[in-house]
Amino acid sequence: MELRAHRLSLQSGAVLHYELDRVSSGELSETGAGGRHLGEEDLWGQASVDLGPTRLHAGLVRYVFRGDSGTGGVGSARNTTEVFASLSTTGRYLNPTLEAWWDVDRVRGAFLRASLDLPVLGWPFPPYAFVFVQTEMGLNLGQGPNPARPGEVANFASRGITHVSLGLGTEVRAGRLSGIGVTTLAFGARSQLNADDATRVDGPGRTRDFVVWLWTGVTIVLGGAGRTGQ
């Protein structure tokens, strides 16, 4: 949902993580072994300000986990809230973004993420399509173990770089669908080099320094007309 007034806009939404396959014991999962259901809900709200090619964001996210920790999933004990701020710019060749995240509930610490999108191909006729190279780096500043509170759960094992990733993505804007809204299909491939013990976790008792995966997603904007350019 979005409300817009000149350069200021207010948005809210939800992201649902649903595991479609049954999970075997030892697999990395939010639901836990045997699960095939909703594993996580991310409820968010933010304010954005457009300043020409630069955009400022600030908001919060509430993370609610629905898994069973007794079978290797992520349970409600890890529920938390983060506030965030970001600065992004859109240029002809480079689209950088810098994000700062603060966990204000469970971990109480900061995390930085820097990302860069490089457009490499665009199809200017309907359906509009864009291909871009994506790179990202994470930096933990305060979401690791706290010696003053040894009982607190940490998101990372130590301060410093958590991961570096590189990928290739594609967006296809299907245009306005009657009775629904504007639909965008996204898909791609991504690789990640893990630099923190927490990001290396690949299931109970398993770790990986380097991972590669395929991803896909659909975005549907209900209501008003969407942009047809980038």
Image: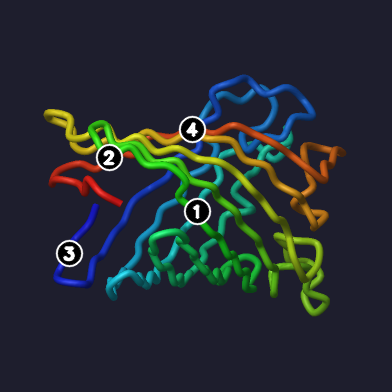
At a point 73% along the width and 61% down the height, the residue shown is 153
Would you say 119 lies left or right of 71 here? left
* Label 3 or label 2, whichever comes before in sequence order: 3
Q: The residue tagged with tag 2: helix, strand or loop?
A: loop
Q: Mark 3 highlights which residue? A: 4
Position of residue 195 measured from the top left corner of the image (x, y, whole percent):
80, 56
* Label 1 or label 3, whichever comes before in sequence order: 3
* Label 2 or label 1, whichever comes before in sequence order: 1
Identify residue type, mark 2. Answer: Pro
Q: The residue tagged with tag 3: helix, strand or loop?
A: strand
Would you say 112 lies left or right of 28 here? left
Identify residue type, mark 3. Answer: Arg
Q: Mark 2 highlights which residue? A: 124
On residue 216, the disc is 4
* Label 4 or label 1, whichever comes before in sequence order: 1
At a point 55% along the width and 50% down the height, the residue shown is 134
Closer to the camera in the image, 77 or 9: 9
* Label 4 or label 2, whichever comes before in sequence order: 2
